[in-house]
Image (cartoon, helix red, strand yellow):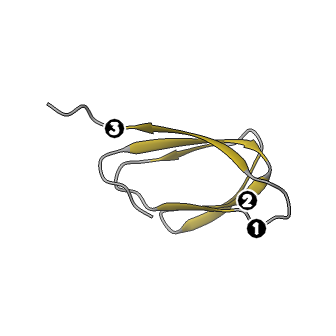
């Protein structure tokens, strides 16, 4: 999916999966940190038989 001006930081807490950022795929695992930039497209797929636990911080621009 794609966000607008917001930015997200994903921390992989446990497990592993397949991360897509701007149409490029790469494996992620426990301890990895991924930055999803504003207007970027991203997705995360748990393609394993274990739980995939993530911590997400979303940062938005202040509205005036």
Which residue sits at x=33%, y=38%? 60
Which residue sits at x=41%, y=43%? 7
Q: Quick one: label 1, few (<14), some, or many (20+) residues within 10 Å?
A: few
Indicate which disc, 1 or 2, sits on the residue closer to the N terminus. Answer: 2
Q: Which mark is residue 60?
A: 3
| Cα distance between the residues tagged 3 and 1 | 29 Å
Check whether the beta carbons of the residues at disc 1 and disc 2 lie within 8 A of each other.
yes
Answer whether residue 20 is visible to the viewer in this image.
Answer: no
Q: Which mark is residue 47?
A: 1
Give the quarter of the figure containing the C terminus: top left
Q: Is residue 20 left or right of residue 22?
A: right
Which residue sits at x=50%, y=60%? 42
Answer whether residue 7 is visible to the viewer in this image.
Answer: yes
Q: Quick one: label 2, few (<14), some, or many (20+) residues within 10 Å?
A: many
Q: Which residue is mark 2?
A: 17
| Cα distance between the residues tagged 1 and 2 | 6 Å
Q: Dot 2: what SS? A: strand
Name the quadrant containing residue 43.
Answer: bottom right
Image position, residue 49 (x, y; %): 85, 64
User: Between residues 60 and 40, which one lies in front from this camera angle?
Assistant: 60
Image position, residue 38 (x, y; %): 36, 49
Residue lying furthest right in this view? 49
Name the quadrant containing residue 44.
Answer: bottom right
**Relative to residue 26, is residue 31 depicted above or below?**
above
Q: Quick one: label 3, few (<14), some, or many (20+) residues within 10 Å?
A: few
């Amino acid at each position: 999916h794609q966000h607008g001006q917001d930015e997200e930081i994903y921390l992989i807490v446990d497990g592993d999966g397949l991360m897509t950022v701007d149409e490029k795929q790469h494996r992620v695992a426990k301890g990895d940190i991924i930055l999803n930039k504003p207007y970027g497209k991203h997705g995360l797929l748990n393609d394993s038989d274990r739980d995939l636990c993530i911590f997400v911080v979303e940062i938005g621009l202040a509205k005036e």
